[in-house]
């Protein structure tokens, strides 16, 4: 399966490491549900912390390249990249209010954190999706850097402005797509997995088959009814 399905070509964890990662996933799921329902923090804080967790989980799952992967193995450089990337987003989450007050007057340490965090996230995207998405990102970044340089004429100001808008505002990496993912998509995936594992989804499909499967156009009616039942639960 790993040979033909890109999504299944991930690290292989067995035994205790697998249980630890499964527990980490469960904690992350509970965290997402709790934060979505009860948190009143700044969006920058919530989304930065969410991406920090995504970086950790992503590097635990996806190896540097697709191919033969040894069970329960993670290279030291992946651990370093994972820790650095997560630390950058946790740093932003912790100091979000102070950084927001600085606006584009961020300091060199903030620029360094933003660059490292962005590069780590880009590498994770390459591992998950592939090189095409990375090419698109690089082209857009080049365009943004060029425009900022044309406006300011100063390489430092160019870099500072781009890093601030890209990493420290909700119009960058923690923008609308990540917000939608954090607020809705993750919850739908969690509850969808819950329905699947508990057998409720199969029950709804069987129930819809019993009710409408025998009639004319039964397949369409079954699809509509089962979808409505699953959607009602989620």
Image (cartoon, rainbow, N blue to C red):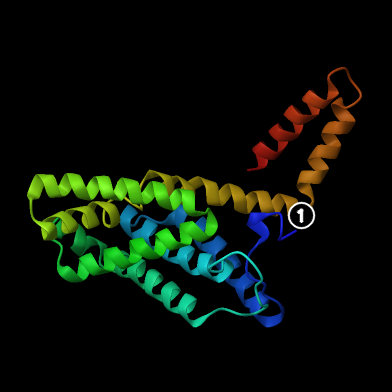
Q: Quadrant of the C terminus?
A: top right
Circle 1 residue: 198
The answer to which image quadrant residue 5 occupies is bottom right
Nearer the observer, 6 or 24:
6
Which structural element holds mark 1?
Answer: helix
Task: Pinpoint residue 48: horizontal percent, then vertical percent.
Answer: 36, 60
Task: Pinpoint residue 176: horizontal percent, then vertical percent.
Answer: 38, 44
Q: Is residue 62 left or right of residue 12?
A: left
Task: Pinpoint residue 101: horizontal percent, then vertical percent.
Answer: 15, 58
Q: Residues within 10 Å of mark 1 (few under 14, many from 20)?
A: few
Nearer the observer, 177 or 128:
128
Nearer the observer, 193 or 6:
6
Task: Pinpoint residue 126: horizontal percent, then vertical percent.
Answer: 48, 58
Asked if one can make out residue 114 in the rendered structure from this viewpoint, the answer is: yes
Vertical placement of residue 49 versus 129, above or below: below
Number of on-image labels: 1
The residue lying at 20 percent from left, 62 percent from top is 99
* Residue furthest top as drawn: 216
The answer to which image quadrant residue 80 occupies is bottom left
The answer to which image quadrant residue 83 occupies is bottom left
The residue lying at 78 percent from left, 24 percent from top is 220
Nearer the observer, 121 or 199:
121
Q: Is residue 172 left or right of residue 182?
A: left
Asked if one can make out residue 34 in the rendered structure from this viewpoint, the answer is: no
The residue lying at 10 percent from left, 45 percent from top is 151
The residue lying at 40 percent from left, 46 percent from top is 136
């Amino acid at each position: 399966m790993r040979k033909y399905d890109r999504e299944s070509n991930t690290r292989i964890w067995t035994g205790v490491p697998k249980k630890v990662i499964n527990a980490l996933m469960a904690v992350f799921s509970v965290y997402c549900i709790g934060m979505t329902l009860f948190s009143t923090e700044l969006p920058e804080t919530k989304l930065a912390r969410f991406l920090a967790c995504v970086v950790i989980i992503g590097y635990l799952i996806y190896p540097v390249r697709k191919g033969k992967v040894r069970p329960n193995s993670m290279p030291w450089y992946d651990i370093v990249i994972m820790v650095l990337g997560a630390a950058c987003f946790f740093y932003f989450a912790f100091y979000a209010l102070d950084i927001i007050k600085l606006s584009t007057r961020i300091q060199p340490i903030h620029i360094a954190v933003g660059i490292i965090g962005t590069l780590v996230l880009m590498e994770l995207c390459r591992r998950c999706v592939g090189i095409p998405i990375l090419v698109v990102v690089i082209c857009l970044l080049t365009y943004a850097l060029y425009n900022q340089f044309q406006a300011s004429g100063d390489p430092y100001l160019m870099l500072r402005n781009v890093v601030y808008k890209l990493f420290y505002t909700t119009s960058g990496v923690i923008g609308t797509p990540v917000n939608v993912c954090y607020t809705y998509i993750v919850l739908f995936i969690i509850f969808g997995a819950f329905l699947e594992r508990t057998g409720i989804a199969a029950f709804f499909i069987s129930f819809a088959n019993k009710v409408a499967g025998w009639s004319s156009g039964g397949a369409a009616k079954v699809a509509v009814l089962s979808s409505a039942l699953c959607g009602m639960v989620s």
